[in-house]
Amino acid sequence: MLNWTTAALLAASAVSSPGAPLPDHEQITAIPPELEAQFQEHVIRKGDSKEERLRLLIDFVLEAPGLNLQYDVGTTRTVAETYRARKANCLSFTLLFIALAREAGLKASVQEYEQVLVWYLQDGLVFNSSHVNARVEAGAERQTVDVGRNVLISRYRPKIISDERALSFYYNNRGVELMADGDLVGAGRHLDAAVALEPDDAAVWSNLGVLSLRRGDAPSAERRYHKALELDSRHGAALANIVTLYQRTDRPQLAADYRRRLQRVQFADPFHQFMMGMDYEKRGQFSMAASYYRRATRLHDSEPAFYLGLARVYSAMGELRRAQRSLTRAYALKDENARKALQAKNEERRQRAGSVARQVNH
């Protein structure tokens, strides 16, 4: 995943080292000679058309005997590091795939999904992320290529982003990962590079606040959290972080004020409601879980996973009729979403074919 957002939970000590070096933009996306040689052999020399090169490229990156890249959420890597490790999170995979696609003469862009449902807990940090994949055009063909083959829950449609924004995600991710490892010097370098590329990204400012707090600089953390909230007043991680800060610095009234703001945001967030439902379900408190799942469906009625959650807890409660209704709704939404995706793809192909025909007639 990309664009990690952190919430400070526990104090951590920094390692006594000069800190991880900061790669420049070219070092992040450079194709190493060994990869270039394999790419030329398996893709360029065999692909006579753009469409064929795209097909060969997908097979080369995702399948054996090519790179056979495996999904690995833990580390954000440069293109060269991804090649050597044969592992990639969504950002590392996308950077590598787009570099190769452009080398093959294809039009390729990074595509971002905002607010996806993925949270991790590691070393006293809560990670929340958005998601990226590659959008590639090959002649009349357009395709989305993604290393994360599991079901992705997203509130919004994807959007094409600039290379600069994608690079800021790299620096932000590495900054958070280094902070989790205790390398506060290296983390600072990377987060500063991220905010230099994307100064209006609330997530980076919130992460910089966490870094300040880990350095013991509460006033700087407060300023950075406020900056994040100026950019996005409903940024959940920044709100959670500033509540933690005010609790630690014995300012209960401010903590209570921002906690109320955070609760209002969470109450209107279907993903938060869904996560609360999952938490209560795991604890066996099925009635509470059902109330959160129902709230999630009211806020976002087109997500099958929400109804599957309801079906599970209703079944556990012995309410089999309601469980069956929820299950039926979940499968209906899956079919509807698949149909809409197919319609959108066919419409895109039709429009592209029409555009090509107009160019030929002209």
Image (cartoon, helix red, strand yellow):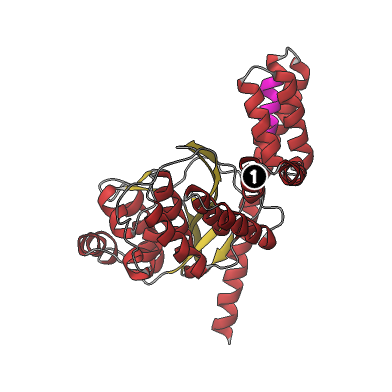
Residue occupying the point 72% across, 31% down: 293
Magenta residues (range):
306-313
Furthest residue to the front? 250
- Name the chief secondary structure element in magenta: helix
Type of amino acid under label 1: Ala
Furthest residue to the top? 318
In the picture, measured across the screen, residue 307 lies left or right of residue 53, that is right
How packed mark 1 is, by other alpha carbons closer than 10 Å (few <14, some 14-19, many 20 or more), is many
In the image, 343 versus 161, the foreground residue is: 161
From this viewpoint, is residue 135 visible? no
Is residue 309 within the magenta segment?
Answer: yes
Q: Quadrant of residue 324?
A: top right
Residue occupying the point 53% across, 49% down: 213
**Percent coordinates x, y for residue 44 in the rendering:** 28, 66
**Percent coordinates x, y for residue 77 in the rendering:** 35, 54
In the picture, measured across the screen, residue 245 lies left or right of residue 323, that is left
Residue occupying the point 77% across, 31% down: 294
The residue singled out by tag 1 in the image is 240
Label 1 SS: helix
In the image, 121 versus 95, the foreground residue is: 121
From this viewpoint, is residue 94 visible? yes
Is residue 134 within the magenta segment?
Answer: no
In the image, 88 versus 150, the foreground residue is: 88
**Percent coordinates x, y for residue 11 in the rendering:** 48, 40
344 over 177 or under it: above or below: below
In the image, 265 versus 210, the foreground residue is: 210
57 over 354 or under it: above or below: above
